[in-house]
Image (cartoon, helix red, strand yellow):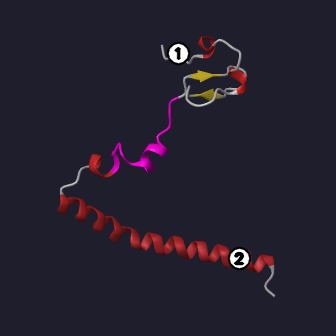
Amino acid sequence: MTTYLELKAKLEALQQEAEAARLAELDAVISEIRATIHAYGLTVKDVFDSRDSPILNSLRMQQPKYRNPQTGATWSGRGRPPAWLKGQKRELYLIRFD
């Protein structure tokens, strides 16, 4: 039976091998992507700034509007208010960008 330390060493070796393979293929992948973008006349906005993309929309983070001065916790103003803001005047916790 293989020991934990032997498995851990194999895992580290495989991770290094996977990273080496990724780096070896990286230039070819980038060249292929650039060629495809050029062939179709795509722009950065075409590829990365689609408003209809649920993946990108889920990755966009809301800027915080409120900050708890005691803990530094923030809240964007969307969703359920955090416990530290319940029953408080929200204006007192607004983040000012003056």
| Spot occupied by residue 41 in the image (x, y as percentages of width and height) | 18, 56
> Residue 91, relative to residue 23: is it above or below?
above
> Residue 27, relative to residue 96: is it above or below?
below
Q: Quadrant of the N terminus?
A: bottom right
Name which residue lies at 67% across and 22% down.
68
Q: Which residues are magenta?
A: 48-63
Name which residue lies at 78% across and 85% down.
2
Give the camera-side residue of 75 and 14. Answer: 75
Name which residue lies at 64% across and 26% down.
81
Residue under label 1: 96
The kind of secondary structure element at disc 1 is loop
Name which residue lies at 68% across and 19% down.
69
First in sequence, mark 2 or 1: give its number: 2
Give the camera-side residue of 27 and 95. Answer: 95
The kind of secondary structure element at disc 2 is helix
Quarter of image, res 34:
bottom left
Residue sitting farthest toward the bottom = 1
| Spot occupied by residue 65 in the image (x, y as percentages of width and height) | 54, 23
Tell me which amino acid carries mark 2.
Answer: Ala
Q: Which mark is residue 1?
A: none
Tell me which amino acid carries mark 1.
Answer: Arg
Q: How many marks?
A: 2
Give the camera-side residue of 53 and 38. Answer: 53
Of tags 2 and 1, which is closer to the observer?
1
| Spot occupied by residue 19 in the image (x, y as percentages of width and height) | 52, 70
Q: Dot 2 surroundings within 10 Å: few (below 14), some, or many (20 or more)?
A: few
Residue under label 2: 9
Quarter of image, res 27:
bottom left
Q: Dot 1 surroundings within 10 Å: few (below 14), some, or many (20 or more)?
A: few
> Residue 74, relative to residue 97: is it above or below?
below
- Separation of residues labelled 2 and 1 (CA atoms): 51 Å
